[in-house]
Amino acid sequence: MLTSRTFLKRTRAGAVMKVVREHYLREDIACGAAACEQCGQQPGEPRLEAQPGGAASSLCPAPHYLLPDTNVLLHQIDILEDPVITNVIVLQTVLQEVRKRSAPVYKRIRDVIASPEKHFYSFTNEHHRETYIEQEQGETANDRNDKAIRVAAKWYDEHLKKINNEETIQVILLTNDRNNKEKAVEEGLTAYTCEEYIKSLIANPDLVDRLACVSDEGKEIESGRIIFSEHLPLSKLQQGIKSGIYFQGTFRANRDNYLEATVWIHGDTEENKELKSSVSKNMLRPSGRVVGIIKRNWRPFCGMLSKSQIKEARRHLFTPADRRIPRIRIETRQSSALEGQRIIVAIDGWPRNSRYPNGHFVKNLGTAGDKETETEVLLLEHDVPHQAFSQAVLSFLPKMPWSITEEDMKFREDLRYLCVCSVDPPGCTDIDDALHCRELENGNLEVGVHIADVSHFIRPGNALDQESAKRGTTVYLCEKRIDMVPELLSSNLCSLRSNVDRFAFSCIWEMNHNAEILKTRFTKSVINSKASLTYAEAQMRIDSSSMKDDITTSLRGLNKLAKILKKRRIDNGALTLSSPEVRFHIDSETHDPIDLQTKELKETNSMVEEFMLLANISVAKKIHEEFSEYALLRKHPAPPPSNYDILVKAAKSKNLEIKTDSAKALADTLDKAESPDFPYLNTLLRILATRCMMQAVYFCSGMDNDFHHYGLASPIYTHFTSPIRRYADIIVHRLLAVAIQADSTYPELTDKHKLADLCKNLNYRHKMAQYAQRASVAFHTQLFFKNKGVVNEEAYILFVRKNAIVVLIPKYGLEGTVFFEEKDKPKPNINYNDEVPSLTVEKTTFYTFDKVKVNIMLDASNIQHQKIRMALVEPKILGSDVPNQTTELSTNSEPEKKKKKLKK
C-alpha cells in the first residue's frame, strides 16, 4: 500500500521548503514474538522471548513485554540497559524521536537492540498497515506520536491474544506523561510510569537508585525560593540570534578555575567583528552572560558520595572528580556500601529553586585509590572510548593465517628488495613507519618513507571503520595503551616488523647530496623490513667506526640528510620548542612506578622526525593539488601578540630580548637567548614559549583559507605517517590512493561538510587523549611519591602570580604552585609587580627563572582529590609563618609511547 507524507524542511541557507515523500505500508512486518506463528520470523532475527521471564513484578505477575514511550527511553536509558530489563518493544516512532533529540541515547539504545541476550525488538510501526496513523488537522506532532505509540501498543495486545499459548502475554506501556497514561488506560491498555514499574520489581530494589529524577512530562516540581533566574525560551533566543542581539556559541569552563569560562562564538559574522571592536581596549576579551541554553552536553560523571550525616537518610550529595561540575543530589539506599567508592552519576535536571542539580546513581566503579579503578575514572572523565572491540567490529578483520595474494599486487610495487628498517622506542609494537636510503647510478640519493597501509584493511563505512573514526586516536597511558584499531592490526598485520612482508604506502624522493628534492613519487607497496631498531641501537650503528653493512650505511645517509633538512627548516623560521618529559620505570610485579628519569633525545630521534615531517608536507601538497576542496589538512595558527607578553617580560628580566614579529624572529632570538652562568635558561625560555602557542587542529581545505603551520613554518601540512594510531592519517591515505589511481573514491570522501564534522571529532578526541595522558602521569606521580616521605629538590620559577609562584622541577618534570596566602591564616606582606614580573613576600623577591628549593610530599588526607604538595625550603622567608604549599599538581610529561614526531 502506498501513501504520501508531507513535511517542511529548512535548507542550509535558512529557507523553508515543502517536501512530499512516498510512504509505503506493508502487511508482512513481524511482531518479533518468538511464539508467533502468524508473522514470518526470519532465522537469527532479534526477537522477544516466547515466555518472557526477567524480573518478577508485583504489578504484573503474568509474562509481559514492555513498550516504552520516547520520554522513558530518553531519560531512563540507564534502567533499560540493566540486565534485569528484557523483552522490550522499541517502536520506530520512538526511535526516530530519540534520534532527533539525543544522538548518545540513540546510539546506546541501538547497541541494546543489537544485544541478543536483552531481547529488545525494534518494530517498524510507521510502515505497518495496521499501526500507521496520519496526523490530524490541528494535532501537534507530539500528540500524533503519542497516539501512534498507543495504537501500536493496542495492536500488540490484540495480536498477542491470537497466539495459541496457555498464558496470554501482556504488553505494558511505560510512560511518564500523565496525559498519555490516562488516555492509554481509557483505551483499555495496561500503562504504568517507569517509577511505578521499577518499584514493583520485588527482587531488584536497588534498581530504584538508577531511576532518573524527572517528574511528570520531564518538568521539575518547583517550590520554595527561586535561586536562579529563568533562561529565555528557545523562540526568543532564535529571534535574538537572528537579529544579532545574542550570540550563539559553545560554553567551555576553565579546567583550572570553574568560576572562569569562555564561549566560542559559532562562525565569524560581521556582527562578531563589531562586538570585538566595541570592546574596551583595556580588555583582552569581551565579556557577557548566558541568557539561554540551546543544547545541553550533560554526561555521566565520576566521583564519590558525600554521605549525609542524617541517620538512615536516602538523599545524599555526590562530589564529581571534575571540579568544574557542582555537587549533585541523588537518592540511594546503598550509601553505606558506596562510601569510599568511585561511582558514576548522571544529571537529570536542575530546578531553579535548588543549589544543586538532581541526578541518579548509575554504576559503582570500585574502590577509590585502586589503580584499575582510577584508570577507569580518568578514561571516563576524558571521554576516551575504551570498551573491548565488539564482534561486529572484529568481523571485518582479515582471517588468519593472512598472506599476500596476486590480486593484492595489482596496484602495488614490490619493494622487498630495498634495505628498509624502522627506528622506534624500546618495546614498541605498533611500528607504523620505516625508512631507507640508497645511492642511485646517477649519483643522487633515493630516500623512502614507508608507512603501514592501514587503509587496506579498514574499508570505508563498515563497523571497523566507524569504530576507528569514533575513537580517533590511540591513547597512551603510563601502564597501558588504548588502541584505535584492534590488536591484530596495530601490533601485527599493520606493524612494520622486521623480516615479514607488509603492505605499505611509500613516499619516495630522489635527492641530491644537499637534500634538495628532485623528484617525488607515491606508491602502494610491499616491503620487508631488514631490522627493527631502537633509537639507541640506530645511534650506536651510526657512531660505530667498524660497522659498514647496508643497514648502517642507509642510516648514516639518512642522518646526514636529516641534519641538512633540519637546518633548512630552522633557517626558514621553524620553531624548536621544549617541554620537560620524564619516563616512569614500572615494577613488573606490582606495576607501581619505582623510578623517574628525564628522557634523553638522540640524533636518531631527530633523524626520524625530519623525514616524517617531510613526508607529511609532500603528501599535503599532493592531496591538495588533487582535492582542493576536500583535503584533510592540519594547521597551527599564529598566536595573538598578547600571548607572548609573559615570555617577553620574563626574558627582559634577564636582560634578554625576544622578538615575536614572526616565527623566524622568535626562533632566531630564542637561539641567541643564552647565559653562560645559567645553562638551563634557554630551555626554560623554550618551555615558556611552548605555553604561548595555539593548539594545532585538523580542518577541511574547502572550509578554510588559512593553511599555514606556524610552528613548522610550512604553508601546508597534514598527517600521513601514523595511521595505526591516528584516524586522520587513514583519511589522508584514502585521498592519496585515489590521487594516484590506487583505489576508488566514495561519497563521504568528497563531502566537505562531513569531513568538517569528522575533523571536529578528531580535534576533540586528540585533546581529550592529551588530558587523559597527563592525568595518568599525575596519578602515577602520586604513586611514586606515596612512600617517599618528603623529597627535597631544586626547582625553577616558571611564573609569578599575585600570591604565588609556579615552579618546575626538571628532575621529575613536575610543576606545582607554591602559595603565600592561605585561608584563615595570617597574611604575609606581598607585593606583585606585573611589569618585571616579580613577587615580593616580606623582604624576599622572586623573579621568573630564579632557582629555589622545595620539599615535595603527597597529601592523601582527601581521598577524592589527593595532591602533591610543595613547600618552599630555600630561600627562607623570614618574619612570618608563611604556609607556602601547593593545592594542585600539574605535569607536562607524558607516558612512554611511540613519539617520533613533534606534536605541532
Image: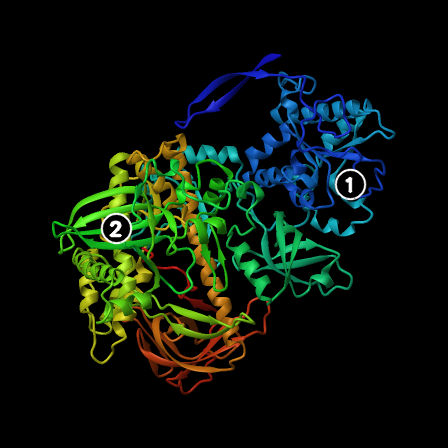
Q: Residue furthest right?
A: 166
Dot 1 or dot 2, earlier in sequence: 1
Above or below: residue 580 compared with residue 572: below
Tell me if 758 is positioned left or right of 320 in this view. Answer: left
Above or below: residue 735 compared with residue 304: above
Q: Please provide percent x and percent y for residue 779.
A: 51, 67
Mark seen at residue 238: none
Q: CA distance from mark 1 to mark 2?
A: 66 Å
The answer to whether residue 682 is seen in the rendering is: yes
Tell me if 129 is positioned left or right of 882 in this view. Answer: right
Q: How is the image coloured?
A: rainbow
Residue tagged by mark 2?
448
Nearest to the observer: residue 193 or residue 876? 193
Residue tagged by mark 1?
197
| Residue depicted at x 85% and y 38% | 61
The answer to whether residue 661 is seen in the rendering is: no
Q: Say which element carries label 1.
A: helix
Q: Please provide percent x and percent y for residue 293.
A: 51, 42
Above or below: residue 375 compared with residue 733: below
| Residue depicted at x 49% and y 82% | 790
Q: Please provide percent x and percent y for residue 709.
A: 26, 50
Tell me if 749 is positioned left or right of 462 in this view. Answer: left
Q: Amino acid at mark 1?
A: Tyr
